[in-house]
Amino acid sequence: MATRRSARLSALAVAQLNDPAAPILPPPAPAPKARKRKASAEDEGATTEEPQLPSTPQKRTVSSKKAAPPPATPTPAAAALLSSPAAQKKPKPTAVSRLADPNKSNAPLLSPQTSRVVSSSPIRPRDIQDGLSPSKAQVPGGATKDTDSTTTENILEKACAHLIAVDPRMKPLIDKYPCRVFSPEGLAEQIDPFESLVSSIISQQVSGAAAKSIKAKFVALFEDDEDPPQDQEDDSKDKTQENDSTPTKRRFPTPSHVLAKDLPTLRTAGLSQRKAEYIHGLAAKFASGELSASLLASAPYEELVAKLVAVRGLGLWSVEMFACFALKRMDVFSLGDLGVQRGMAAFVGRDVKKLKSGNGKDKKWKYMSEGEMREISDRFRPYRSLFMWYMWRVEETDVSTME
């Protein structure tokens, strides 16, 4: 139609030129401009494809960070700072092979007043330098004789073998969870018993973060204090077991430092009145010699517990955790620890979830009776500390806040 109209208009225009009397028509209206669209690659000769149906875009997955590995010395949550030193992280100590005894303390202990190291003697330094095994003794003629002695290098291996021999079900746990607490490196860590016990008191009934903050403020109270003169009496008590006569650098206040501060000053670190009294009383026990590194290193377990439980602020559970994870005693077992109870119940094949749901309202209820726990754990003597550590692992009990 547009072509016929254009022809008619052209004819009228020619008629107007030939006949001046013909009417003048208005110019034709311009044709509407069509929208220009951008030429796509498909318009340039490419074959057209059928439009795809709309789809919901997939959600962007954010890779979650891997959880941090468990600390080197895991213990129950309530004793978060038991073996955590006040100083910053130090390089791993060199493991020196020493005689070990599952019924005594195996950690090198710092004398709180003198900072001297109290520990068992190294195993034949000359043999170690010559490349001989610490468990081999040199005999005349150059031959070696296996003495089968228990040392800090092999006590963990012996303990694991004993646990598996008593109950083969322990093997999967031991293979899955290497225990660093009683490893040669763990047994080489120097422990200040006064610091560990003070940390145990600080951490009572507070979160791990709060306990760390209070401990840091407590240590800061003594930054400007000079070291007191070494106690000759305490030094003579520890002399029989000293390996290093050179005092180590002091980073935690001594008992004498603590006794020099009054209770209001100690409370400025965030301590309650009762905890300040507990720490003050503990410092008095060490300053008087009633407690010492040599006593904690060699005393029988029953005597050790009786001495420490007599100190205000230290209960049986706190003493058991101190003996196991600070002193590195191998034959400690806590009958009152709920995590150990739960792990043992699961270890013998009981459904701990049903046990909890059926008896959770009873405040005195336990996963397992103390008599049954004692009967089972006694089979693992003298390495019940290691057995207890693995019972926490059975049910993946959160024991990560000790460090």
Image (cartoon, rainbow, N blue to C red):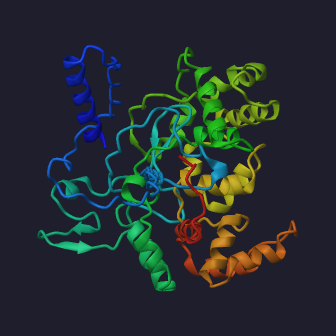
Residue 392, horizontal then vertical, whole percent: 59, 66
Residue 369 seen in the current view: no
Question: What residue is shown at x 34% (from left), y 74% (from top)?
Answer: 148
Residue 21 seen in the current view: yes
User: In the displayed structure, would residue 87 be above or below residue 41?
Assistant: above
Label tally? 0
Toward the viewer: 333 or 347?
A: 347
The image quadrant that residue 355 belongs to is bottom right
Question: What residue is shown at x 20% (from left), y 24% (from top)?
Answer: 14
User: In the displayed structure, would residue 379 be above or below residue 92?
Assistant: below
Residue 228, horizontal then vertical, whole percent: 56, 21
User: In the displayed structure, would residue 225 be above or below residue 155?
Assistant: above
Toward the viewer: 384 or 15?
A: 15
Toward the viewer: 11 or 230?
A: 11
Relative horizontal placement of residue 28, taking residue 11 as reference (left or right): right
Residue 306, horizontal then vertical, whole percent: 73, 55
Residue 314, horizontal then vertical, whole percent: 73, 47
Relative horizontal placement of residue 45, taking residue 229 as reference (left or right): left
Question: What residue is shown at x 31% (from left), y 73% (from top)?
Answer: 147
The image quadrant that residue 212 belongs to is top right
